């Protein structure tokens, strides 16, 4: 018999049911709209990736009901759960989606999620099946999913990630399910069943980092979340306490939880406000971003060219060096988890965006040659500082014998203390979508997202984002 030490499932269901637009903090809505714009851009950019094209073809063969939009150069419609699968895979394909922040040193960054894509693509997919969904209803559902996902990730034991689970795939399932359920209007009992169903569908393990399957984790989280909500809506039952007890999600997937991080904390405050969310300046794991910014500072301030660099050493703790595991990169997927490539890209281009994460750029002789002159080293003093900040130090040895040393700034670009400006966010959206949307259409999408609360029917936004 399972022990029922907590009642988290009941509390999560109550939060989803009671979520109301009129009680949303203005700051949650402001940041949420920024996350929606960022997510849409990433879905469009990721739609061109090979992994997404394969998943799209798979879904076209297996899903025939034209319910919900799949974005890209050739937009089409599929059953909602398949649209969520394809768009979710696209949204994570470039590893450029936002990141939930850590609140304490034991909540390592990998434990936390890329929170936007699962509830965003679930909301988009399900909204098209519900008739008219206003911008207010859409944002309420999206922010409900965002908050549920973040609080579950924050509460589960760090053993979840340390043992090899990919939280964006596992916990992302609950974010998608909560958003879909809110739009479907599930009652309290159905919501508890939905959470029990989602607990059995959550999946994703870290062995697939650096492969096509990592973005599939997020696609499957979105698909499984939508499926769990649709099943519960249709009368399908799961355990009404699926998060709790010795056989519940927290115990089975994480060997327990810190209940005080979720009990009484849903929406109090909203995680999107405090500790906040980081919208990424680079299409790779946020663990690398302070180091990349440090490299960018060294390169720009010293006007360096690749041939000026004899050697680069990046010193960091295990929280960075373990997941960023490749010592060299052969393709753009490995490149996202390869510090030598990421620093080399900054040195060669002065930036890292859509163009830099292509097979042609990764395999370019200049990039490959510079990667061989870059290495990482474990630093016990940095490790001792803890994992609530992404500490690192870069040492660049020049061919003229000079050494430039710089500690990475904890106030990294994209984080709440140093966020991307709206103009920088719009520039990122343009980089992601310019090969698909015209400049006029991009401007119209930006205006529509920033005014979502005034939109009578969210299908207008979907129509704009598919005007190729």
Image (spheres, rainbow, N blue to C red):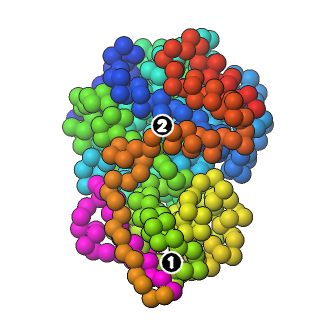
Name the residue: 33% across, 34% down: 273
- Mark 1 or 2, which is nearer the eye? 2
Viewer-side residue, 85 vs 464: 464
The reply to whether residue 181 is visible in this rendering is: no
Horizontal side of residue 337 vs 316, given as left or right: right
Q: Is residue 185 magenta?
A: no
Q: Which residue is mark 2?
A: 422
- Which stretch appears magenta? 374-399
Q: Position of residue 388 (x, y in %)?
A: 28, 54
Q: Which mark is residue 374?
A: 1
Is residue 9 positioned above or below 43 on the image?
Answer: above
Number of on-image labels: 2
Q: Is residue 169 above or below residue 40?
A: below
Residue 427: assigned label: none
- Residue 376 magenta-highlighted: yes
Q: Find numbered disc 1 in the image and state the secondary structure of the residue it sits on.
A: strand
Q: Quadrant of residue 404?
A: bottom left
Is residue 214 or residue 397 the one in the foreground? 397
Q: Residues within 10 Å of mark 1 (few under 14, many from 20)?
A: many
The C terminus appears in which quarter of the rendering?
Answer: top right
Indicate the position of residue 107 as horizontal and vertical percent values.
30, 51
- The residue shown at (27%, 35%) is 262
Whether residue 24 sits left or right of residue 384 in the image: it is right
Q: Is residue 287 visible?
A: yes
């Amino acid at each position: 018999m399972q022990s029922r030490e907590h009642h988290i499932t009941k509390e999560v269901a109550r939060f989803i049911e009671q979520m109301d637009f009129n009680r949303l903090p203005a700051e949650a809505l402001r940041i949420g709209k920024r996350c929606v714009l960022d997510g849409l851009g990433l879905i469009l950019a990721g739609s061109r990736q090979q992994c997404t094209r394969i998943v799209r073809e798979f879904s076209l063969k297996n899903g025939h009901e034209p319910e919900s939009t799949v974005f890209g150069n050739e937009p089409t419609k599929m059953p909602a759960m398949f649209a969520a699968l394809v768009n979710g895979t696209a949204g994570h394909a470039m590893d450029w989606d936002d990141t939930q922040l850590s609140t304490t040193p034991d909540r390592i960054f990998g434990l936390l999620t890329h929170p936007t894509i699962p509830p965003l693509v679930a909301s988009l997919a399900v909204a098209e099946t519900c008739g008219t969904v206003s911008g207010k209803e859409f944002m309420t559902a999206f922010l409900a999913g965002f908050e549920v996902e973040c609080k579950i990730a924050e509460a589960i034991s760090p053993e979840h990630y340390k043992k090899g689970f990919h939280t964006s795939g596992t916990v992302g399932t609950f974010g998608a399910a909560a958003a879909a359920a809110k739009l479907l209007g599930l009652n309290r009992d159905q919501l508890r069943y939905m959470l029990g169903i989602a607990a059995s569908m959550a999946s994703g393990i870290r062995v697939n980092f650096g492969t096509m399957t990592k973005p599939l984790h997020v696609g499957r989280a979105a698909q499984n979340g939508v499926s769990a909500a649709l099943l519960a809506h249709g009368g399908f039952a799961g355990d009404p306490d699926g998060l709790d007890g010795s056989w519940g999600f927290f115990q089975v997937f994480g060997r327990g939880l810190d209940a005080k991080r979720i009990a009484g904390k849903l929406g109090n405050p909203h995680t999107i406000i405090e500790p906040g969310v980081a919208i990424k300046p680079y299409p790779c794991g946020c663990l690398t971003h302070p180091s990349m910014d440090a490299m960018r500072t060294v390169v720009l301030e010293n006007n360096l060219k690749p041939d000026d660099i004899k050697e680069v050493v990046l010193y960091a703790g295990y929280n960075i060096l373990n997941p960023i595991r490749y010592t060299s990169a052969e393709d753009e997927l490995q490149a996202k988890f390869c510090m030598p490539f990421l620093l080399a890209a900054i040195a060669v281009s002065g930036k890292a965006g859509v163009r830099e994460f292509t097979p042609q750029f990764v395999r370019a002789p200049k990039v490959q040659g510079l990667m061989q002159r870059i290495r990482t080293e474990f630093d016990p003093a940095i490790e001792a500082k803890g994992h609530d900040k992404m500490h690192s130090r870069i040492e660049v040895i020049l061919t003229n014998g000079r050494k430039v040393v710089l500690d990475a700034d904890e106030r990294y670009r994209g984080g709440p203390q140093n966020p991307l400006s709206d103009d920088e966010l719009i520039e990122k959206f343009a980089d992601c979508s310019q090969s698909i949307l015209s400049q006029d259409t991009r401007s119209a999408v930006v205006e529509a997202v920033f005014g979502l609360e005034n939109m009578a029917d969210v299908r207008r936004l979907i129509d704009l984002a598919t005007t190729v």
